[in-house]
Amino acid sequence: MKPVPPHLRRSSTFPPEVVAEIQRAAGTSIYDIRGGGAKRRIPDFDDLLFLGASMSRYPLEGYREACDTTVQLGTRFANKPIEIKIPVTIAGMSFGALSANAKEGLGRGASEVGTSTTTGDGGMTPEERGQSKILVYQYLPSRYGMNPNDLRKADAIEIVVGQGAKPGGGGMLLGQKISERVADMRTLPEGIDQRSACRHPDWTGPDDLAIKIQELREITDWEKPIYVKVGATRTYYDTALAVKAGADVIVVDGMQGGTAATQDVFIEHVGIPTLPAVRLAVEALQELDMHRKVQLIVSGGIKNGADVAKALALGADAASIGTAAMIAMGDNAPELDEEYRALGTAAGYYDDWHEGRDPAGISTQDPELEQRLDPVVAGHRLANYLRVMTLECQTLARACGKSHVHNLEPEDLVALTVEASAMAKVPLAGTSWIPGAGGY
Amino acid sequence: MAVFDLAQQPLRELNRTLHDLPEETNETHWKVTNPMGLHNIAVGLDRPITVEIDGHVGYYCAGMNQQAEVLVNGNCGQGVAENMMSGRVVVRGNASQSAGATAHGGLLVIEGDAAARCGISLKGGDIVVKGSVGHMSAFMAQAGRIVVCGDAGEYLGDSLYEARIYVRGKVSQLGADCVEKEMEAAHLEELRDLLSAAGVEADPADFRRYGSARNLYHFNVDKMDSY
Ligand SMILES: Cc1cc2nc3c(=O)[nH]c(=O)nc-3n(C[C@H](O)[C@H](O)[C@H](O)COP(=O)(O)O)c2cc1C
């Protein structure tokens, strides 16, 4: 397209992307499906700042004085809690959505730095189990590939109630990604569009969940930590109910959390951001005297060590990443720009992960494309990125004088915007004002 | 025969004992008394043993069963034999909802009735119900067979994949994409085998067969009314 003459006024109500979407809808009669997370601007961790040390707070020496980053998960009921060396874990992403090589790369990268990976909708692959020192096995509504042998092989079990990108939505994997192996693992015909259920088939509500958790514990002889993952919506109540149902760990995924394939309208319009969700979950845990006894993992748009440090300061025990891990392994790499252009997109913008044509070999089941991803190289890149995140998190913690990243606290934070201040319940920078607190 | 009294010993002890049995165990027959409607009795078994439970049980009895035969002389709560992989589970009474949910293998026999969502998301297991089943049975069932000697409630086989359903009585309403299909010789044969495996006296010729029309296998805007 030619450049637009400067006198033409851009409409805020109908900007070019809105016009394009109306035209696309009119032409196709189907809603837009895509991968990734919410793209709209929402209050997030970038709207918070650390105060750092001052006259009354003493910092720790960088590279010298220790700043511990280990996290224990599952200390409430599990006989074999797990320990991760860094406060960042890899979120559940299905084999099916991702290639076997990508899953292996995630396992290699996470294991290199002593953290965990998570299976996803579609079951556990031997590659993934083999390469992941600590593997969390998801228990999803679809129950694809679910079996007691893999349950026993897992280091922890994550019951998925919802995902931040689509709280209340099931999954979908379009036919082009249902290869023979994927179909076989899911007990489905090859090549069909496949829907993962949005409700669990044999329980509803917190009272049933308590019995379901007991069942999983009985089957695995009370060894494994049991996580409950929820999309961020009514987070205060969901957290309290998950604690009551007997969870060891709560995973809260904010609305900016990534997905492999969901309707754009769902991604952009359902759920609450990660920022208020962390605070709500922590409040519920504190109210029940369960903060740090039931651990909290948060995800949804986590992109660097500052995000992790801020999530921990608000009271989380660890953060987890999906999209950023894919990027670290090579998704959206600038070297692939021409190939992305051929798909009608560009490096840095590619989100058609549901189509299975990913030139990076990550969100695909195409055997040729998949071969492009070397799981050893991808694993190293992920490990590098995880190390950087950890160093960044430690740097901020030391600046606040903390010898363990868990010693970061809300008191170390201020907000840059009124919205973030209200959502995180930390004061607006330069004031003692928290909108909504203290009867305002 | 070893007897385990749940009024005297905790559930954890029962499940642990059954899990810890050596592969070649001689203790192949277990009796469980006083189940008192407890949940999660005899879950996660993986030995070729028989466990007979005298009384009513709560949720998920025989959940994720492998190899074992579990007999319930009573009624079952939600999700009996859920995600069973192999073996055999027989309920002498009625079963609550989601009986045999997501079962990948094995045979579940319910001598009474089964409530809603019987065989939901079935993945290869077989279910034979002597009585009737409630609404939404075989919802999203992917593989395996469900035999209903009585009637089936509303929305039978809604969003069905490749599971096969046989019903002798009335079907109040078929779910989206579930249709009646011709009963061919091979189906009569497999039905005869299932009935005989379940110990049910019935003539396969009295049953009708239902399966997926496969119209929802690919998203299609023209089928909007079915979604
Ligand atoms: C490609 C892809 C596949 C996913 N698959 C699953 C899944 O199978 N189960 C699940 O609970 N969440 C799934 N998620 C969501 C992630 O577990 C996680 O909640 C999310 O990616 C976190 O947000 P982030 O991507 O901004 O880091 C997936 C996300 C992506 C990007």
Image (cartoon, rainbow, N blue to C red):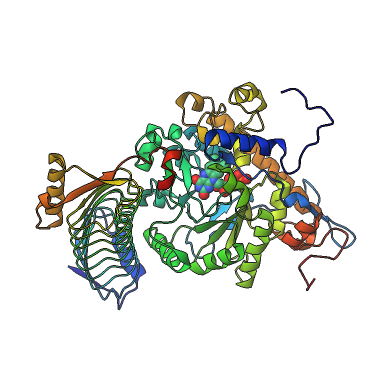
- In this rendered view, identify the residue nearer to me: A69 or A316: A316
> Could you tell whether A353 is left or right of B45 in the image?
right
Residue A407 sits in which quadrant? Answer: bottom right
Q: Position of residue B207 (x, y in %)?
A: 15, 51
Can I make out residue A408 in this image?
A: yes
Q: Can residue A135 be seen from the camera position used here?
A: no
Quadrant of the image containing the C terminus of chain A: bottom right
Outermost right residue: A55
- Residue at 68% across, 62% down: A279
The reply, left or right, for residue A420 in relation to residue B222 is: right
In the rendered image, the quadrant that contains the N terminus of chain A is top right
Which residue corresponds to the image point at 47% horizontal and 43% vertical from the top-left?
A172
Answer with the quarter of the image where residue A217 lies: bottom left
Q: Left or right of A394: which side holds B76?
A: left
Q: Residue at the location (67% across, 52% down)?
A: A69
At x 33%, y 47%, the residue is B160
Q: Residue B189 placed where, x, y %? A: 12, 44
Give percent across and percent down for residue B67: 24, 53
Position of residue B5 relative to residue A298, above or below, is below
- Closer to the camera in the image, A402 or A203: A203
In terms of image quarters, where does ligand 1 lie? top right
How many numbered marks, from 0 up?
A: 0
Which one is nearer the viewer's eye here, B82 or A18? A18
Is A92 or A22 nearer to us in this picture?
A22
The percent position of residue A210, horizontal first and vertical second, equals 45, 67
